[in-house]
Each structure stands twice: as C-alpha cells, then as structure tokens.
Image: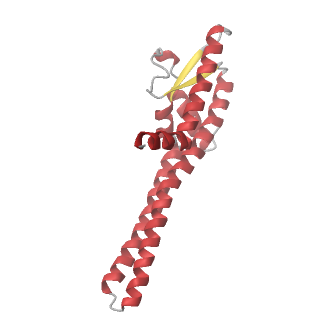
Amino acid sequence: LMPLKKNLRFLGNRQNIIIVILSITLSFFIFYFLFFKTSAVIYVVDNQKMFQAFRMTKEAKIKGEQLLKAQKIKIDSLNVQLTLEQNELLKSQLYSQIISQKEEMQYFNENYTQEETSKIWKRIEGYMVDFAKLNEYDLIIGSQGTGDVWYTTPKKDVTEEALNYINKKYEGFN
C-alpha cells in the first residue's frame, strides 16, 4: 500500500508531470531533427545553470526569504506575548494565532517556490525563443545532467551566451 501511495503522489506532482511531458516533447524534437532535418545544428544550454543564474530567480529568492523572515518575526512576537500573558483566555487566543501564522507560513513555503519557479521558467522560455531566433539556431535543447543529453561539444553549449542574453532582456536592455 505504501509504494502505491508514493507512486500516486509522484503522478500527482505537477512538476513531475511537466518534466515527463517536456522530456517526451524534447525526445520527439531530437528524433525529428536527427532523422528528418539533418542540416539542423543542435545547441545545448544547461537548464539548471540557466535557472540558478537568471536574475529573476535571484530576485524571487531574496523576496521569498524576506517574506519568510517577516512571518517568522510575527510568530516570534506572538510567542513572546504568549510567555508573558497571565490571562488564560488571552493565552488561548495567542496560541491559536501562533498556529494560524505557522500554517500560513507553511502554505507560503509550499506555494511560493512553485509559483515563482513556474513564472521564471515561462520567462526564460520566452527569452530563449527570442535568443534562438536572433542567432538563427534551429534547435536548442536543455541539459540538466539527468541523462537527456549525455555529451555535447563545448562549441555547441551556448549556456553563457544565452544567460547573458536573457539577463539583459530581463533588465530591459534587449
């Protein structure tokens, strides 16, 4: 029963479903370009490096940390009030507020990262389309070190060039 729950949880995770769909789509495009369009030149970017070094990712991380810190300060303040309070009714109310604040913080933790990650990937995808068109690239595939791309010659890896482009685009320079 436990392995079944784990498998169902895996299938229910939106990120995993998106990764599976993207992997299948990527495989289809690679197959198509390798067998039907032999003149295509394939370039590679390191998806993880791209995501981590993208300025929007760094900004979202800082914003999330600030929001979590503010939530933690609220909870700490309520805890101090709770320890100083003598009235049992007010203690009970403070305790309920602390529980509520902790639940809000947990909800924020779970959802903020997922929502921001989705926004960031959409922005990167749009910028990468522009980048590919600007450079007249036929195909750019992502490499995450997960087995999708096992090797590429360094001259086909355009991660740094693409990263420079998307960061400038994000800042409004392109």
Q: Is residue 68 left or right of residue 40?
A: left
Across the whole image, how many numbered discs are drawn on residues? 0
| Residue found 60% across the figure and 31% down from its top | 21
Give whichever of 15, 161 is nearer the camera.
Answer: 15
Query: Whole-percent x and y of residue 41?
Result: 61, 13
Q: Is residue 72 above or below residue 138?
A: below
Q: In x, y percent, where is residue 12? A: 54, 43
Q: Residue at x 65, y 14 (%)?
A: 32
Towards the viewer: 4 or 112 = 4
Q: Is residue 76 left or right of residue 5?
A: left
Which residue is at a point 63% across and 29% down the rendered structure image? 131
Point out the residue furthest to the left here: 83
Residue drawn at 53 percent across, 33 percent down:
163
* Colouring scheme, one of rainbow, by chain, secondary structure, one colour: secondary structure
Judging depth in this view, the residue of 64 and 148 nearest the camera is 148
Task: Give residue 69's quadrant in the image.
Answer: bottom left
Relative placement, left or right, of 117 versus 76 is: right
Q: Quick one: quadrant of the N terminus?
A: top left
Location of the C terminus (image quadrant) = top right
> Where does the image place residue 127, in percent across and percent down from the top left?
63, 35
